[in-house]
Amino acid sequence: MSVVEPSAEALTGADALVRTLADCGVTHCFANPGTSEMHLVQALDREPRVRSVLCLFEGVATGAADGFARITGVPAMTLLHLGPGYGNGLANIHNARRAHAPMINVVGDHAMEHRKLDAPLSSDIESIVQANSSWIGVAETPADAGALAAAAFGAAHGPPGSPVTLILPADTAWLSGGQPAPAPQLPQPARVDDAAVAAAAAAVRAAGKPVVLVGGPALWQPAGLAAMARLKAAGVRVMIDTFPARQARGAGRFAPDRMQYFAEGAMADLDGTDLMLLAGTTTPCAFFAYPGKPSVLVPDGCTVHPLSARHEDTVDGLARLADALGAPANVPPAAARVVPDRPQGPLTPATCAQSLARHMPDDAIISDDAVTAGLPHYLATLAAAPHDWLFLTGGAIGQGLPLAVGTACAAPHRKTIALTGDGAGMYTVQALWTMAREKLPVVTVVFANRSYRILNIEMARTGAGNPGPAARAMLSLDGPALDWVKLAEGHGVAAVRAETAEAFDEALARAIAMNEPVVIEAVL
């Protein structure tokens, strides 16, 4: 049965919105719709250029859109049901905002007249979305929908990129009179001012122990990696934020140092630094405040000097700074790939990391929500096959599995490997169902330590004292222990449990070779 295309005169507001986004280049919609979005669902059914992906929880939809954008640089559309639906997706919108990932959240609302009645699902959507939206639009008539969709697409790109929100009342969606709008002219990053480059170069020459802290696209664009390698060769230490959005790394790629997570470790690592240049990022601070520990991660006596802001072309700015410092034009390539031996013995984060470095295929994408188990894997894969590492930018756990859904949709020719803690994974376990339904060959490794281990560490660091029985119960995930094999199989995903280093190594090799989603429960 063929789909009947509406005539130009009969376009609804929903049709105009969806068609405009498709004309702009939106190819995916990660959706959890409700009654107020039914006409948007029909409009998506009539638009073959947009792949609609159902997610069983809004946090999966928003996390998937984040992952898609981090790999493609193009926003996906989410479809969310009123204010509560947006609220369910908010944590991963928060992470996306911190990642500067472009995302278009389309939120349905009650019809314009019905909004006055304070129906049970009514809420102040504009206030709810404000904190995590760089742009908000409300399409009050069908004629508004197309133009606002085009404006949302442009606003999501920034620079820097960010989530935006387009609110579509139900009657705007169903009424005729919609008009598609042309794709907007996308703004480009601003050029770093010559004076800023010259001032940064002069500051470096006057410093004894300079460091440049880098964020944004320079961490994954080849020209950015090359510029950072040149700066290191010129005597400038190159560092990245603790949790950037994305980093291209592995054999043959320049490896900057990474800002440490714990404040005291970061300060010890920076000891003696007298100049900190900021390139595409901001002054570093600790994740949390601790009694007697610093919050701003800049040593005493260190001058903080801006090179480029997030909206500026940091890649070009770094290259021009390297030129100004007389850095060598060509730097020897980074170390070649190293393949570790097969791990043996008890299963630990270190032995799991050894297996990942052994079996990681070229051009893999790592979605890291492993919390305490993540760092050993990051360190072990420094000289693994070239890959992209995606970080937990906003600290809201439950990102890893949804992000992997989005990256697998964005780059089906690349292998996505999701690393998650058992506690973090339970936040958005529904993502496994979407992997199965969409046949996304994601390898998910769940580190089952039966605990919120990071919180056990933080209990001591915050000075809250030794945990008693009630406190220990709030930080423990045993009694009953989660069964990730059954959880995965219940969502339609094949799964295996590994309890030794040898078993995990074999399971990971098999999973990476398979063309279907697989979960490995690593019992630590």
Image (cartoon, rainbow, N blue to C red):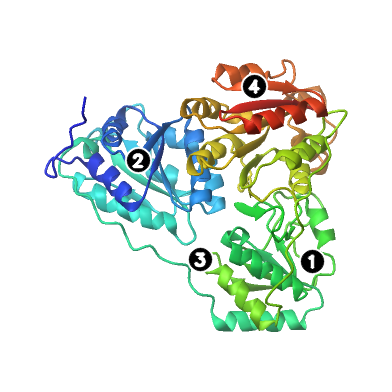
**Total marks placed:** 4
Q: Which residue is mark 1?
A: 299
Amino acid type for the residue under numbered disc 4: Ala
Q: Residues within 10 Å of mark 1 (few under 14, many from 20)?
A: many
- Marks 1 and 4: CB-CB under 8 Å? no
Residue at mark 1 to residue at mark 2: CA–CA distance: 50 Å
Looking at the rendered image, the disc whose residue lies closer to the viewer, 2 or 3, is 2
Looking at the rendered image, the disc whose residue lies closer to the viewer, 4 or 3, is 4
Q: Which residue is mark 4?
A: 495
Identify the mark nearer the N-term, 2 or 3.
2
Q: Is residue 111 above or below residue 234?
A: above
- Marks 2 and 3: CB-CB under 8 Å? no
The image quarter containing residue 35 is: top left
Amino acid type for the residue under numbered disc 3: His
Amino acid type for the residue under numbered disc 1: Pro
Residue at mark 4 to residue at mark 3: CA–CA distance: 43 Å
SS class, disc 1: loop
Amino acid type for the residue under numbered disc 2: Val
Q: Which residue is mark 2?
A: 50
Residue at mark 2 to residue at mark 4: CA–CA distance: 31 Å
